[in-house]
Amino acid sequence: MSQFTEPRERRNPDRAKSREVNYTFPMHSPLNPELVVFLGNPGKQYSQTRHNTGRMLLSFLPDTDSLIWREKFNGRIADYSTTISRCRFLLPETFMNRSGLSVSAAVNFYKINLNNLLVVHDDLELPFGAYSWREGGGLAGHNGLKSLKDSLGGTGFLRLRLGIGRPVRGTVQSWVLGRFTPEEEGILPLVLSHAAESFTGIISGRESFQKYAEPVMVYSP
């Protein structure tokens, strides 16, 4: 399986050109989050772990190779645009259980309402191979989401949940900080590609948010 690489800060002022799309199907109201947060732990030693699945999704979104990242808000932030919408991407550089420090700093600076915040994260309650979209909901023991709730004062933000399943044996901590099995690593790009398509479809208005409210099983053993 190819390695998921962390984006680097770029100083090149050239911006990626947006792709033109000819829509031949009914349009929905675009979901326009002002800030999209990709949760995970910083550092190469964590880049391939289950807890970093949210950050892995970034590599599968279109036109992200040329994003210009800036160090700010205890993380890295970049402007992202499509033919229809514009938003900001945030990669917290705190550890997972302190993600709220980074996210709340950006939310407060840009004066963003919680319903205009989208958080992409791994989820124990969904089996590997599944993903879903949700607004609000429980935290399922996720330390990153707990930190966001504590710092933001609520959980009313949008969420793209990427399933990692629960461990059959061992602790949850060792599970989320461990790598996927070789079989899972071979399938993971397919899952993330499918989730990325839902992301671009919903952001652009080609698909509805409600379509993905129920878990989508991309792979089932």
Image (tube, helix red, strand yellow):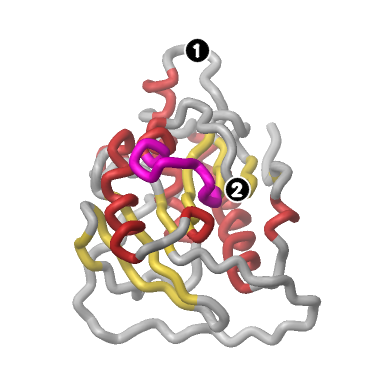
In the shown orientation, is residue 215 left or right of residue 109? right
In the shown orientation, is residue 163 left or right of residue 90? right
Q: CA distance from mark 1 to mark 2?
A: 31 Å
What residue is drawn where x is 44% and y is 70%? 87
What residue is drawn where x is 44% and y is 20%? 172
* Three-letter code for the amino acid on which mark 1 is drawn: Arg
Reading the image, the residue beneath label 2 is 135
What residue is drawn where x is 59% and y is 29%? 125
What residue is drawn where x is 57% and y is 37%? 163
Name the quadrant of the C terminus: top right
* Three-letter code for the amino acid on which mark 2 is drawn: Glu
The residue at the far top in this view is: 169
In this view, the residue in front, 53 or 71, is: 71
Q: Is residue 87 above or below residue 3?
A: below
Say which mark, if any, is on residue 5.
none
Where residue 184 appears, as percent x and y from the top left, is: 54, 37
| Residue 152 is a magenta residue | yes
- Tag 2 secondary structure: strand
Reading the image, the residue beneath label 1 is 169
Instruction: Locate residue 131: give its quadrant.
Output: top right
Where residue 60 appears, as percent x and y from the top left, is: 49, 61
Numbered range of the magenta stretch? 148-159
| Residue 2 is a magenta residue | no
In the shown orientation, is residue 97 left or right of residue 149? left
In this view, the residue in front, 166 or 180, is: 166
